[in-house]
Amino acid sequence: MKKSNTNDSIENSAKSNKRSLALKSILENQNGSESFDKKSLPPSRKNAQKDLLSGTSQTLPQSIELFHGLIHRELAKAAIELGIDEVELKAWIDLQIEVPAKTILNLLRMMQSLHLDPLSEEIGFAQYEDGQWQVFITIEGCAKLLNQHPQFNGLAFNQADTLIDGVPEWIECSIYRKDREVPTTVREYYTEVRGENAIWQKMPRRILRHRALQQCVRLAIA
């Protein structure tokens, strides 16, 4: 039992250190700490740059602590708002060691505003080809937002007659609301959103339809 506790402690410490390093990198980028050639700077600029980096280094631990405090506060609020176990939610958050702290904070706030539960796979994270992370509303989350919205009045899909590799060139989604005269319509093009992962290879039409629905829900409901 002691060996297991020790391993858990080491693993948790490694995750914490990795998150701190990732957050440090984010904050350094926000503060404008970019790489540069010191030899190309005049002495006055070198000193100014040195002072700036020194000042950033002194305040960085405080900034990291502030971010951790914000995440802890929003996590507790989100757990209460959605009626889920705070410890379970924290465990889920702790597993997202690759996700920037800013994105985690955004998810916790979106959870509360949209009342979506990541433990039920209604909301989560997506990383794009450029390495950027974004909060992602799943199809389950979209269905929940639609069916619980008092103004939701149905939806419809339409697709192109032209095909690309056997898949419609585009699929569009229209969402109708009782309080609007015209529907909100979003069209997604296959060549713009298709991916290379296995699910795109297995069911491209379904995933293209999902992309159209998700973007339409963002505009019409979320």
Image (cartoon, rainbow, N blue to C red):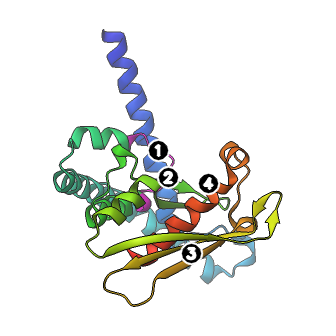
Q: Are marks 1 and 2 in contact (CB under 8 Å)?
A: yes
Q: Residue at x 36, y 14 (%)?
A: 4
Q: Which residue is mark 2?
A: 22
- Which residue is label 3 attached to? 49
Is 194 left or right of 101, judged from the image as shown?
Answer: right
- Where does the magenta region start and end? 94-103
Kindly indicate whether the residue at mark 3 contacts the one at mark 1 (C-beta within 8 angstroms): no
Query: Dot 1 lies on which element?
Result: loop
Task: Tell me which label, 1 or 2, sits earlier in the chain.
Answer: 2
Q: Residue at x 70, y 79 (%)?
A: 41
Tell me the kind of residue under disc 3.
Answer: Gln
Camera-side residue of 162 and 57: 162
Dot 1 surroundings within 10 Å: few (below 14), some, or many (20 or more)?
some
Query: In the rendering, at what x and y percent does residue 92 appear?
Result: 36, 41
Which element type, helix, strand or loop, lies under badge 4? helix
Inter-mark Cα distance, 1 to 4:
30 Å
Q: Which residue appears farthest toward the right when viewing the image?
A: 165
> From mark 2 to mark 4, how far is it between C-alphas?
35 Å
Number of the label disc, if any, that sits on residue 97: 1
Q: Which residue is mark 4?
A: 206
Q: Amino acid at mark 1?
A: Ile
